[in-house]
Image: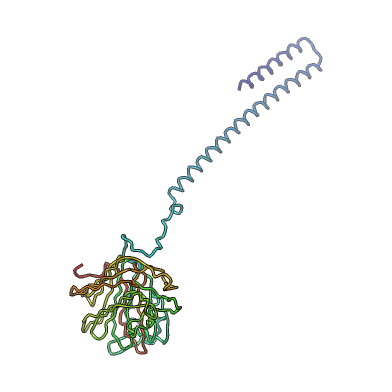
Amino acid sequence: MKKTMILTAMAVALCASLVACNNNNNSSTDTETVTSATTSVVSDTENSTTGSESETEAETETETETEAKTETETKTETELETDPKTETEPETETSNTPDSGVTDISKTFASDAASQYVGDCIEDSDLCEYFTWHFGNGQDAIKSDEEGKYYDLGHVNAIYAAVKGKYAITVDATILGGSYATFVRGVHQLTNATGNNVWYYEDTGLGSTDLMGGAGISAFIRDGKLSLVIKTYDETASQLIGYKRLDYDMPNCTEWTIADDGLNTIYILAGDELIYTITLSGSQTYGDAFSIVSPNTEFAVSAVITDKDGHSTTVENTLVAVAPTEVAVADRGAVGCAFRRIEVKKFSDVTIPNS
């Protein structure tokens, strides 16, 4: 601004000199020279003003860019704080160990054979909406008798599903022949050191197809008895698999439930009656005894079984998983079992007497 005022004053002074020269009758050439000088000064004034304005605009643009950058950085920081996509997700628990904060399973399932179509195979039924069907041998189908429709897993078959949390599996079934059972805390593939696979439906070489399956806790009702089988590691057995079996009289009962609290206690009920309570402790593997254990798991060192009458039995070196793994239903025999209803539900939906 000061520079502009000085240049303006100089222009005025020159004009005054021009007037004075005209009064003294100077030549037109001098007048033109002075006029040219005046024009030059005015031009310099305009250029100076323009330059000043340009500097001001440049400063303003710089300030605007700085403010915009600051706003962008502030906005970015705010978005990072509020955008849920940028939050760090907790690590997923993958180890198969008991969780003291275990909750009910989120995915449940219930199927009544009465809602199926006679002649349909298992892969066409709603069982395969929840379970993985592991086909061994023979054709399965939806059949019917005087009591109504039923699932016939037929010959050699199994269905299984992964579970994480606390849960219960209930089955209503009538034995027709052969063997069948429901399983918890097991694995669908157990391959021993000799390379032999022991699936849920597999005979374990123990002299009875009622003892099928390589790992876990199995239960079934047959001939008026509720049978409970705990699989164990036995280095003297042909498949390295042993067992402990208990039978409890349950005449006229066709429904049983295995309820797993997700920690270390499993309950076996016949109808609404608590028959067995199993308490697990310890954790171990068996080295190279089994080359494949799927799903991968550790097994409880011991299991204490207490029946309804208060009698207790301790089983060591179990092949029972220390935490929930899978639920399964298996059948073996030319004439199998009539499964009327199969349900996997929340643990909290089961009433455990005296617990």
**Image quadrant in which the C terminus is located:** bottom left
In-front residue for pair 226/3: 226
How far across and how far down the image is residue 101, in percent? 31, 60
Question: Would residue 12 be found to the left or right of residue 195 on screen?
Answer: right
Tell me if residue 323 comes above or below residue 7 in the rendering: below
Q: Residue at x 23, y 77 (%)?
A: 271
| Residue farthest top in this picture | 24
In-front residue for pair 349/76: 349
User: Residue 288's quadrant in the figure?
Assistant: bottom left
**Image quadrant in which the N terminus is located:** top right
How far across and how far down the image is residue 213, in percent? 36, 79
Question: Would residue 263 be found to the left or right of residue 38 on screen?
Answer: left
Question: Would residue 25 be found to the left or right of residue 213 on screen?
Answer: right
Q: How was this image coloured?
A: rainbow
In-front residue for pair 41/238: 238
In this rendering, the count of numbered labels is 0
Tell me if residue 28 comes above or below residue 147 in the rendering: above
Tell me if residue 63 comes above or below residue 309 in the rendering: above
User: Residue 35's quadrant in the figure?
Assistant: top right
How far across and how far down the image is residue 216, in percent? 34, 74
Question: Would residue 195 be found to the left or right of residue 337 on screen?
Answer: right
User: Residue 241's quadrant in the figure?
Assistant: bottom left
In-front residue for pair 73/193: 193
